Image (cartoon, rainbow, N blue to C red):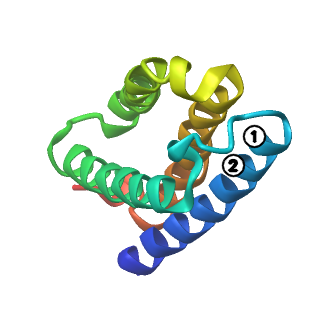
Amino acid sequence: MVAGGVLVAFLLSSLVNALIAVLAHALGAPDDFSQLEPSRYVSLTALGVLGGSVGWTLVRRFSPDPERLLRRLVPSVVVLSFVPDFFLFGEGEVTGVVALLVMHVAVAAIAVPTYRRVMPLSSAR
């Protein structure tokens, strides 16, 4: 059930990120901005969803209060994940970079409820 949930989170996140990329190009993101190509964002989406599931599992297992820790950890990790994107303003301009930032938030918004469903915190210990 866990693997299936993580797979669904990855597929749904990839679909939403594809829509964000299309919208970003329609709003003027450079056509040659490689970060908005599926081969780039799909692999990074997989990494984010899988990495998040590993982190979620570790917090469930080892934290005495996983709910409290995740309430702080998830937004912190999402904000930290923005940092590399800020170095891409010259390549992707504002529209492209904002699209990448929105992608990070979208993945978290999809993955976290999925993790809650397939790896509930109440049964962590």
Q: Quadrant of the N terminus?
A: bottom left
Outermost residue toward the front in this view: 32
The foreground one among 79 and 38 is: 38
Question: Mark 2 falls on what kind of element?
Answer: helix
Q: How many marks?
A: 2
Toward the viewer: 78 or 57? 78
Q: Dot 2: few (<14), some (14–19), or many (≥20) neighbours within 10 Å?
A: many
Residue at the image position 47 percent from the left and 18 percent from the top: 86
84 left or right of 55?
right
Which residue is the site of mark 1? 24
Image coordinates for residue 73, horizontal then vertical, percent? 36, 28
Q: Tell whether label 1 touches label 2 (CB within 8 Å).
A: yes
Instruction: Please state which of residues 10 and 19 is positioned toward the viewer in this rendering.
Output: 19
Q: In this rendering, would 39 be left or right of 14?
A: left
Residue pictured at 45% horizontal, 30% vertical: 78
Camera-side residue of 114 and 121: 114
User: What's the distance in space between the residues labelled 2 and 1, CA to CA?
Assistant: 5 Å
Q: Amino acid at mark 2?
A: Ala
Which quadrant of the figure contains the C terminus?
bottom left
- Residue 106: give x, y in percent of width and height: 62, 44
Q: Is residue 125 above or below residue 80?
A: below
The quadrant holding residue 76 is: top left
Label ID, residue 21:
2
Q: Residue at x 53, y 27 (%)?
A: 91
Q: Which mark is residue 36?
A: none
Amino acid type, callout 1: Ala
Residue, far right: 26
Residue at far left of view: 62
- The residue positioned 84% from the left and 35% from the top of the image is 27
